[in-house]
Image: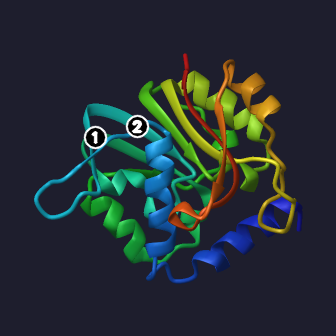
Amino acid sequence: MNDWNEAQEWESEWHSNCVNSYGEEEKQLLYADRMGLVRFHDGRGPYNFDMKGASVLDIGGGPYSLLLKCVNVEGVVADPILVHVPDWVKQRYVAANIGFIETPAEELDSDKVFNEGWMYNVLQHTEDPELIIQNARKACELIRIFEWIDTSVNVGHIHTLTEENLNKWLGGYGKVEALTGQANCYGRCYYGIFLGR
């Protein structure tokens, strides 16, 4: 088994039955804020994003994609972990009219052009982060990203991302911040909005 397959197995075990997603979703709201997404209150809750008809490719969105909190969106989640999640997770995407692709983003080859591509806390888990960014830049007009940088490598996180490499791969400059507990997030992060195709 190679490192990537072990990382997928680790990630699948991490999410388990996907029932208690609060911790991950709390962090995602912080990621969304740093990626420039603006929340609105729909009368039931303040955790909604109006995408105003945009098409969005969520690369690595996993079982609880931010697309589930969006309205007026044409969304697709691309994540190989979806092969391993319970069927009810996929049915939730179907009910929300969100498409999903159960393939690694290194293999994305779509004729469709998306208005936006999102990547948040995903690239450490992938086989080739640079290739994924190249594919996203081909498929998306705009890229929103939030990634952890300068982290240790382990079985679930097989790459150490750096500000220098992300700037180079994205063709611009992201913001770097040290988080110290906001939304249960700790460490150095990199985020920004970049032009794609």
Image spot of residue 66 (x, y percent): 41, 53
- In this rendering, does residue 63 appear at all? no
Identify whether 115 is placed above or below 1.
Answer: above
Image spot of residue 25 (x, y percent): 45, 65
Tell me the CA gap for discs 2 and 1.
7 Å
- In this rendering, does residue 89 appear at all? yes
| Quarter that holds the C terminus | top right
Mark 2 or mark 1: whose residue is earlier in sequence: 2
Left-right relation of 7 to 23 = right
Q: Secondary structure at mark 1?
A: strand
Question: Residue drawn 51% across and 61% down?
Answer: 27
Point out the residue furthest to the front here.
Answer: 180
| Quarter that holds the N terminus | bottom right
Q: Residues within 10 Å of mark 2 (few under 14, many from 20)?
A: many
Which residue is at the front of the view, 161 or 1?
Answer: 161
For badge 2, the amino acid type reads Val
Question: Residue drawn 51% across and 64% down?
Answer: 183
Q: Secondary structure at mark 2?
A: strand
Identify whether 159 is placed above or below 154.
Answer: above
Residue carrying label 1: 73
Which residue is at the front of the view, 183 or 140?
Answer: 183
Residue carrying label 2: 56
> Do the residues bearing badges 2 and 1 touch, measured as CB atoms within 8 Å?
yes
Which quarter of the figure has residue 42?
A: bottom left
For badge 1, the amino acid type reads Val
Q: How is the image coloured?
A: rainbow
Left-right relation of 109 to 19 = right
Question: Residue drawn 50% across and 35% down?
Answer: 117
Image spot of residue 90 (x, y percent): 40, 66
Which residue is at the front of the view, 14 or 191?
Answer: 191
Which quarter of the figure has residue 194?
A: top right
Image spot of residue 55 (x, y percent): 35, 33
